[in-house]
Amino acid sequence: MRTQIAAANWKMNLTLQEAQTLLDNILKQTDNIGENRKVIFAVPACYLTVANEKIANTSNVFVAAQNVYSKKSGAFTGELSVTMLKSINVNYAVIGHSERREYFNESNQFLADKVKICLEENITPIFCCGEALPVREVNQQNDFVTRQLEESLFSLSAEEIQKVIIAYEPIWAIGTGKTASSDQAQEMHAHIRTQIGRKYGEAVADGISILYGGSVKASNAKDIFGKPDVDGGLVGGSSLIADEFVPIIKALK
Ligand code: 13P
């Protein structure tokens, strides 16, 4: 079975003290995550080291950066490189979240460079894709997501793409309380897997974890994660509340 993943995306939230309390709370309730499952915390950059210390004695729990730059070093004030992440033992990075695409104009091509540089440093990219409401309203979501995959991922080799985690996050469901139905999630996840299969073959497509993101909550996680092509979730708001995120972890297949 594919690895099942509950990933928290804290976005730009929590003070250091709040972050520490939240992690302590979640970790003490999830000491046995189980084989074939992972929990990943995408925390603000300034908490990466602290979060890594907190998870030091756990198994199957990891820390991720929420973003990384497309170059390894240089005069890029304010940016964070894969080399830096590696040097503090961070092995995952969220790439292409819709908020970065929208507010920081990150293009598919730019994201292709980020994915590539992550893989060069053995950092697992959690690559986000997903359509906005106007695209869904005219039923163009499949073509839209296909294009995101083609332009950001499909220049990778088969060996490289197997190391990528994909997160499908329909923008209209992010932070809105409006979740895609589990059938809508399944439909898109199956579509993504088919596109990967078309390019790289079924065996490669079958091995890639595809997470759903967008208003995942304790109350809907089981239904969504239960779908055959949904391999867990990338969770925003509900990952900031231990009583929400712990049941989400437990809802993994
Ligand atoms: P919400 O869970 O708050 O809708 O956010 C989803 C998300 O953007 C995770 O990356």
Image (cartoon, rainbow, N blue to C red):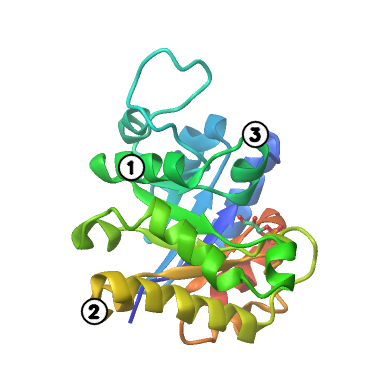
Q: Is residue 153 shown to the viewer in this render?
A: yes
Mark linked to residue 203:
2
As displayed, is residue 161 above or below residue 191?
above
For label 1, the SS is helix
Give the Cα separation between the discs numbered 3 and 1: 26 Å
Decide if residue 79 is on the left or right side of residue 58.
Answer: right
Residue that carries the numbered disc 3 in the rendered image: 16
Decide if residue 173 is on the left or right side of residue 66.
Answer: right
For label 2, the SS is helix
As displayed, is residue 114 above or below residue 221?
above
Query: In the image, which is nearer the foreground, mark 2 or mark 3?
Result: 2
Q: Amino acid at mark 3?
A: Leu
Q: Residue furthest top?
A: 75
Quadrant for residue 121, please give it: top left
Give the Cα separation between the discs numbered 1 and 2: 23 Å
Decide: few, some or many residues near mark 3? Use Cα within 10 Å; few <14, some 14-19, many ≥20.
Answer: some
Mark linked to residue 118:
1
Classify mark 3 as within 8 Å of ligand 1 or not, answering yes or no.
Answer: no
Which quadrant is home to the N terminus?
A: bottom left
